[in-house]
Structure formats: C-alpha cells, structure tokens
Image (cartoon, rainbow, N blue to C red):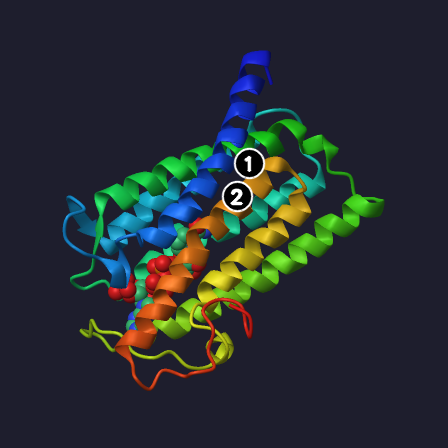
Amino acid sequence: MSTTEHQIFTFLVAFGFLMALAILVLLFRVTAPYGRHTRPGWGPLLSARTGWIIMECPGVLMFGACFLSGGPKSVGAWVLALLWELHYVHRTLVFPFRIRERGKRIPLVIVASGVFFNLINGYLNGRYLGVYASAYSLDGLSALRLFGGSFIFVVGFVLNMHADRILLSLRKPGEQGYKIPHGGLYRWVSCPNYLTEIIEWAGWAIAAWSLPALFFLVWTMANLVPRAHAHHRWYRTQFPDYPANRKALVPFVF
Ligand code: NDP
C-alpha cells in the first residue's frame, strides 16, 4: 500500500467510525424509509428486488477485486474471504428473489446510500485482507480467533437465513400485509434476522481481528439496533395481541 493510499485508508476507517455513531443517533430519530416504514417524500422509488440487487452487488465485487489485489494469500485470508462472499452472494442473488415484492418499492436514496457504504466497506475490508493476507497464520491465538470467529459467523449465517425464511413465508402469493411471526428466535425477539446478522459480523470481526472488520460490525449495529427498536414498536402498535414478553433484539434485555 503506498503512503497516499495508506493515508486515505486510515482516514476512511476513522471517518467511518464517526459516521456510524452519527447514523446510530440519527436512525433512532428518523427510521430508514423502506419496508414497513416506507413513506412519501423520499424521492424516486425502485422495485424492492432491483434495489436489493443493486445495493448489495458492490459488496461482492468491490471486496472480491480488492481481496485479489496485493500479494499471496494465506489459508486464513481465504477462509475470511469465502465467508464474506458467502454472505454477499446470498444477499445479492438469493435473498432478493425470495422476497414477495409485488408492489413493494424502495427509495433510490436508500439504494444509493447502500451502494456507497458497500463500496467503502468492500474496499476497506477487501484491501486490508488483500494486502495483509499473509499475516493470518494458523497457530496459537490467531488460529483460535480465526476458527472461533468463523464458527460464530456460520452459526449467525444459518440462523439469519432461518429468521428471514420465517418472515418471507408469512405472506401467501399476492399478499402484501404483515403478520406476527412465530417460531425459532421469534419466541424471544421481534427481529432475530437483525440479531443474527450482528452475530455474523461479530464472528467475522473476531476472525479478521482488524479495524475495518470492527468498523463493519459497528456500522451494522448502528443500522440494525434502531431499526429493531422501530420494528418492535410498530408491531406493538399494529397488533394488540402481540406477545408481551417478546423483546426487540436481545432476548430478555432489549
Ligand atoms: P425486514 O424484517 O424489514 O423485512 C424482511 C422481508 O420480510 C421483507 O420482504 C419484508 O416485507 C418481509 N416481512 C418482514 N416482516 C414481515 C411480517 N411481519 N409479515 C410479512 N412479511 C414481513 O428486514 P430488512 O428488509 O430490513 O432486512 C433484510 C435482511 O437484510 C435482514 O437479514 C437484515 O439483517 C439484513 N440487513 C443488513 C443490514 C446491515 O447493515 N448489515 C442493513 C439492513 C438489512 P416488506 O419489505 O414489505 O416490509
């Protein structure tokens, strides 16, 4: 990495952490206007499926291109890259085709901000792994972090798909409304899809043990903690029979 690129890289990481804090505060005040929180006044709209594909594909491509740059890769770096691509290929090419999107729209501004974030995040994490890949050795504490973190990631990934599947099976073909989800982690929380997404990236951050990976985890939490709070409040106002002991995101706590 040249000195100039290193300066830009360091600036982006530092700026990213500050932005995550700002986003956390902002999203508790203004809920991101997509899905059940869609409302007029947010500009042009795209179909939800197209929006998800456009928004997530930089996560696959930018990360992949940056990872492949730099020197030879260790096994540890390949493990991290494969886990990342597993998530993003699923989110780009599988998830959008499973949503019941008839009539569902997403504001262009949300898609554009998702693209912007995924470009920066893909660059930071891909480039870090691409350049420092040889540092991931497979002995001692490094191996424990790598395999422990990867295990947590895989558990989060499987539970995330399960939580998404429960939501996506609530509507019959042609239906557009909302129902109370049951089963799995929905017994305890309103948004297990968000909880398990956070678990995934916490696992990846432990495995990668880098500032860009920590930035991604913090950013994910800054997005999903306020959104879980908003979803939970929304369920409670929409469904008088909503399970009283269910929390928003963390069982028994929040
Ligand atoms: P939501 O839970 O809002 O919605 C997921 C899908 O399920 C949507 O198609 C939604 O329809 C449908 N759905 C949700 N609840 C119900 C219900 N009660 N009844 C019927 N259908 C329902 O999740 P998001 O769209 O916000 O996120 C999708 C995935 O992306 C999640 O796994 C999340 O973790 C991940 N994500 C990750 C982020 C990150 O920063 N890493 C940021 C945002 C999302 P509709 O669209 O009509 O509401």
- Please give the label number shown on residue 125: 1
Mark found first going from the N terminus, 1 or 2: 1
Residues 21 and 145: in front is: 21
Q: Element at badge 1? A: helix
| Residue 87 visible in the displayed image | yes
Q: Amino acid at mark 1?
A: Asn
Q: Please state which of residues 126 and 254 is positioned toward the viewer in this rendering.
A: 254
Give the side of residue 95 with respect to residue 101, left or right.
Answer: right
Please rate how many residues cluster around mark 2, counting C-alpha atoms within 10 Å: few if below 14, some from 14 to 19, many from 20.
Answer: many
Q: Position of 139 compared to 160: left or right?
A: right
Q: Is residue 171 visible?
A: no
Three-letter amino acid code at the position of disc 2? Phe
- Residue 216: which disc? 2
* Residue shown at 41% from the left, 81% from the top: 182
Q: Residue at x 47, y 70 (%)?
A: 162
Q: Work out whether residue 186 or residue 159 is closer to the camera in this orientation and state it.
A: 186
Q: Residue at x 56, y 52 (%)?
A: 201
- How dense is the environment of label 1, judged by Cα within 10 Å: few (below 14), some, or many (20 and up)? many
- Residue at (25% x, 78% y) in the render: 172
